[in-house]
Amino acid sequence: MKLLFVCLGNICRSPMAEGIMNERIKKHGLLWTVDSAGTERYHVGERPDPRAIAQCRLHGIDIASKRARQISRQDFNRFDLLFALATDVQQELVELAPHAASKIHLLLDVLYPGENRSVPDPWYGNEADFAHAYDLIDRACDALVQVYAPR
Ligand code: 4NP
């Protein structure tokens, strides 16, 4: 199974999700691959935000080699499941690829079904905002394993 996490810039939330899920894949021995992308192109080619790198490092996860990229048309075919980190991102993905709507999910639906919750954008925030985003994503990744991994 191929998973894609998507946020706006691909420098804060979705790179953390990619790093955390890669750790879970190893831990559980899953045959999954994971990647991340942004809907916007402002930060293409950049490393994750230093605050996202630091937050992951606190948990032993290294995301420093990730480089931001923008979502492409092919991504909607190449990936089995696309998880938007926020409702605005989910809407944009569905507009970009209505034919792929059944693959496009809101990440926090796995924790809070039907509540339409976003991981708050920590870009203008502080370390506590990054820690909060990390915690939500961390719990969502555990829940994804519970829901989608074969037993
Ligand atoms: P991300 O955070 O979507 O979690 O990577 C953002 C990073 C940059 C911007 C917005 C959100 N920006 O407007 O540049």
Image (cartoon, helix red, strand yellow):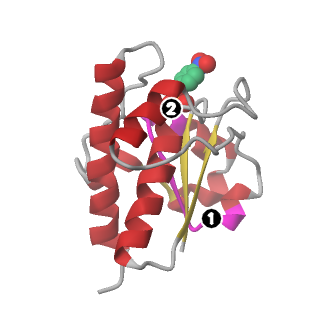
Q: In the rendered image of this protein, does residue 64 appear above or below residue 22?
A: above
Q: Residues within 10 Å of mark 1 (few under 14, many from 20)?
A: some
Q: In the rendered image of this protein, does residue 93 appear above or below residue 123?
A: below
Label 2, label 1: how far apart the Cα atoms are: 21 Å
Q: In this rendering, would 53 be left or right of 69?
A: left
Give the percent coordinates (x, y) of residue 56: 41, 41
The question of residue 83 being in magenta is answered with: yes
Name of the residue lying farthest toward the bottom: 151
Residue at 61% across, 30% down: 9
Question: Disc 1 on helix, strand or loop?
Answer: loop
Tag 2–tag 1 contact (CB < 8 Å) = no
Q: Tell me the magenta residue range.
A: 77-90
Residue under circle 2?
Answer: 12
Residue under circle 1?
Answer: 79
Name the amino acid type tagged 2. Answer: Cys
Give the percent coordinates (x, y) of residue 35: 60, 55
Q: In the rendered image of this protein, does residue 127 appear above or below residue 88?
A: above
Q: Is mark 2 within 8 Å of ligand 1?
A: yes
Q: Quadrant of ligand 1?
A: top right
Q: Nearer the viewer, residue 87 or 78?
A: 78
